[in-house]
Amino acid sequence: MWGNRSGTEPKNAKSPLRVRAGLAAVALPLALAATIFFVYRAVATGESVWTVEAVIAAAVAVTAAIDLVVIRRRMGNRP
């Protein structure tokens, strides 16, 4: 069962974890910078649109951070 391959995936398929890690590593600082900028604009202008933008950017930053943690854990469990 374990040795028999029935799918079309090649034997030497590469994992996309490094690409995901690179994208998350770029997204995290950009999202943090955007969050700081949008919070500053929200405080300076008092417009609620900047608060919404800050929440969206913060959600992207949290998602990227969680993704980096998951990727690090999965890369550590590789054979």
Image (tube, rainbow, N blue to C red):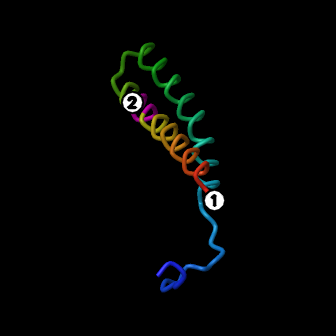
- Is residue 44 within the magenta segment? no
Residue furthest out toward the left: 48
Q: Residue at x 61, y 80 (%)?
A: 10
In depth, the one of 31 and 14 nearer the eye is 14
Report which residue position mark 1 lands on. Answer: 79
Instruction: Identify the disc placed on residue 55.
Output: 2
Q: Provide residue 74's location: percent of width, then percent of height.
A: 55, 51
Q: Nearer the viewer, mark 1 or mark 2?
A: 1
| Left or right side of 45 for 79 | right
The spot of residue 40 in percent (x, y) is 49, 17
Which stretch is magenta?
A: 53-58
Quadrant for residue 39, please give it. top left
**Which image quadrant is residue 25 in?**
top right
> Where in the figure is residue 42, as x and y percent of width and height?
41, 19
Which image quadrant: the C terminus? Answer: bottom right
Return the residue nearer the eye: 19 or 47. 19
Vertical arrangement, residue 62 with respect to residue 47, above or below: below
